[in-house]
Image (cartoon, rainbow, N blue to C red):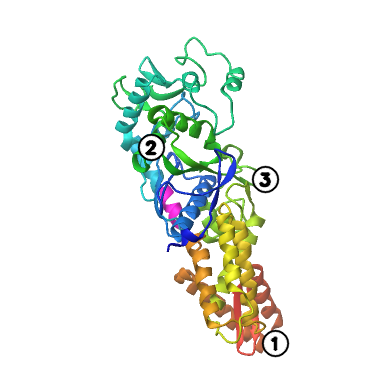
Amino acid sequence: MELYQSQNLKIHNSLSGKKELFKPLNEGRIGMYVCGPTVYSNVHLGNCRTFMSFDMIFRYFKHLGYKVRYVRNITDAGHLVDDGDDGEDKIAKKARLEQLEPMEVVQRYTIDFHNILQKFNFLPPSIEPTATGHIIEQIEIVKDILDKGYAYEKNGSVYFDVAKFNETNDYGKLSGRKLEDMIANTRQLTAQNEKKNPQDFALWKRAEPQHIMRWPSPWGDGFPGWHLECTAMSTKYLGETFDIHGGGMDLKFPHHECEIAQAEASYGQSPVRYWMHANMLTMNGKKMAKSTGNNILPGEIFTGENSILSKAFSPSAVRFFMMQAHYTSILDLSNDALLASEKGYHRLMEALDILSSIVPKGVSDFDVQAWKKTCYDAMNDDFNTPILIAKIFDAVKFINLLKDGEKWINASDLKELQNTLNAFVFDVLGLVDKSDNADDSDKLSGVVNLLIELRKEARDNKDFETSDKIRNQLDALGIQLKDGKEGTTFSLS
């Protein structure tokens, strides 16, 4: 029996606004689509948080024994600067400014995206399709929507007719908006605008002479609308109806709302059973934005080359920080928050090291099975990683008591505790043991042990000023010395 068969997982469905018991369309199999990046710049830390949330969800599904087809796209065309139907393509604009081919821009920032996610220890998706690789599929959907009367062509562009669609469907059901209210709060179209109504959105746009990203179509040279690519790729690889569609909260309207409309117009049925949305990442209590300077790139956190944080932080410390908030909650990044998370991460890794050297004996003072159930209960409650981490630290407290000889554990419980912690810490949360980075760990140990030796020489020579200086400066760097009968050891705080 697979593990998922004994678990009752509930997921917050953005479409209903409620937590619902998760039942996939096909027993033991899950189809999940997540909106990926528009690759015209270095990946934003806030986007990393969204992708990390769904990496954790992907990991938990796999841990439960599901076979998951996880599709995360790359947007390499069609996303205009104002996120609407006007303006310049984001990638084409970057190419023009840097005097590059658009696909050079795409290649550069796709590589950056993959490198950053690899540092964060993401699992790769099952399929990573691109918008430009699915132009034919997008054109076919536009033709189908036109044939069914939910779109109209104007001067080589094709627009989705929201008012027509809303006569038989509910446009706005995901975001909770009413078309009547949207119409009432919208300015009238200018004479130059091709749309029948301001709410209509582009399925296909005519390419002006200066537009360098263009493809032939039945309506002339042009390019697909931003929303269309996700409908084409998700349904191609997961079917006309699939289990989960995820993305950032900012995509709920209009992007995901338009995806629903396109799919219902073309296929006559709702495309997604569970809509999931991850919340935003702020910094020092404010929205992250390049224009205000309140912004930091993941690579700048890893190297410490920035004017915002006091030091560099490892990818696992940052990942641990992000896992300490529920994926639907706003998370605020700050220097103090990262320092606290780093300290907690090191405590956790040290506890796992200690556990590996514990010798079982006596009767267990810890109900491992009851504790294990609380870990699954947390994850089954809409992937509640902050509660899971709290439960993990209950085990950390017990491990430290085992080390001090104040508690005992028998062999079977010890094995169960080790296996469960490894599963949740490494397989589900996706953290990396700091000892896995052996080269850096060995270098650090070598430097600290040299300083310990110099401190011992200073103490033997009664040079207590130098001895105290070494201890205090190491302590300020988060390296604590512990003097014992067997000599001096150190730990990272």
Residue 318 visible in the displayed image = no
- In the picture shown, does residue 383 fall above or below 76? below
Depth check: 60 or 350 in front? 60
Say which residue label 3 marks.
285
Please state if 208 lies on the left or on the right of 375 as rendered: left
- In the picture shown, does residue 189 fall above or below 465? above
Q: Position of residue 295 (x, y in %)?
A: 58, 44
- Secondary structure beneath label 1: loop
Q: Quadrant of the N terminus?
A: bottom left
Q: Residues within 10 Å of mark 1 (few under 14, many from 20)?
A: few
On residue 240, the disc is: 2
- Secondary structure beneath label 3: loop
* Start-end of magenta stretch: 112-119
Magenta-colored stretch includes residue 89 = no
Q: Position of residue 370 (x, y in %)?
A: 60, 69
Q: CA distance from mark 2 to mark 3?
A: 41 Å
Kindly indicate whether the residue at mark 3 contacts the one at mark 2 (C-beta within 8 angstroms): no
Residue 309 visible in the displayed image = yes
Q: Amino acid at mark 3?
A: Gly
Say which residue label 1 marks.
462
